Amino acid sequence: MDANISDFVYSSSKPIVWVGNSLEVLRAFPSDARQRAGRQLWRVQTGRLPDDWKPLPSCGPGVSEIRIHTERAFRVCYVARFQDAVYVLHAFEKKTRQITKRDAALIKSRLSAVLEARKRSE
């Protein structure tokens, strides 16, 4: 029975589309932060919510951030509202209480690029 359950979970997961340099940035996270990010992204891929997340409506409709706490704080921003994929828009180390204007602008820009590319492919 376990094989059937894992087959279902695997077959119902969405692929991840890495936007910009988000994958390279995430790969540069420390090992423990990288592993936690991977587990949380897997939860999103399989239709569940991350353990620690927050919506970012100021960055666009459907944009959320996974909050990763180790000795330092990291964020992975994504949009999962589409049926075909989870789009990882940005990953970064959080050093201030609020998201910086630069990070917010980058997320908005990448979301716009995703929406434009989706429009062109319809």
Image (cartoon, rainbow, N blue to C red):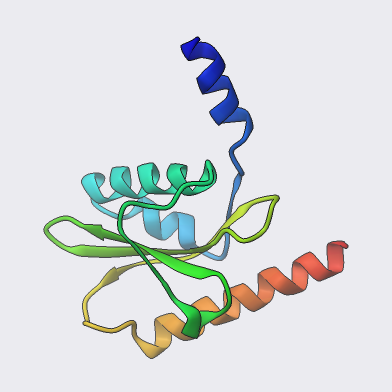
Residue 114 position, x and y percent, is 67, 69
The residue lying at 41 percent from left, 80 percent from top is: 103
The answer to which quarter of the image holds residue 62 is bottom right
For the residue pair 25 and 41, the one nearer the viewer reads as 41
The outermost residue toward the top is 1
The outermost residue toward the left is 71
Residue 84 position, x and y percent, is 70, 50
Residue 83 position, x and y percent, is 69, 52
Q: Quadrant of the C terminus?
A: bottom right
Q: How many marks?
A: 0
Q: Is residue 62 left or right of residue 31?
A: right
For the residue pair 5 and 65, the one nearer the viewer reads as 5
The residue lying at 58 percent from left, 80 percent from top is: 109
The answer to which quarter of the image holds residue 119 is bottom right
The outermost residue toward the front is 1
The outermost residue toward the right is 122
Query: From what the image shows, is residue 88 above or below residue 94?
Result: above
Q: Is residue 113 left or right of residue 37?
A: right
Q: Is residue 14 left or right of residue 58?
A: right
Residue 115 position, x and y percent, is 71, 72
The residue lying at 39 percent from left, 60 percent from top is: 25
The residue lying at 64 percent from left, 51 percent from top is: 85
For the residue pair 21 and 11, the one nearer the viewer reads as 11
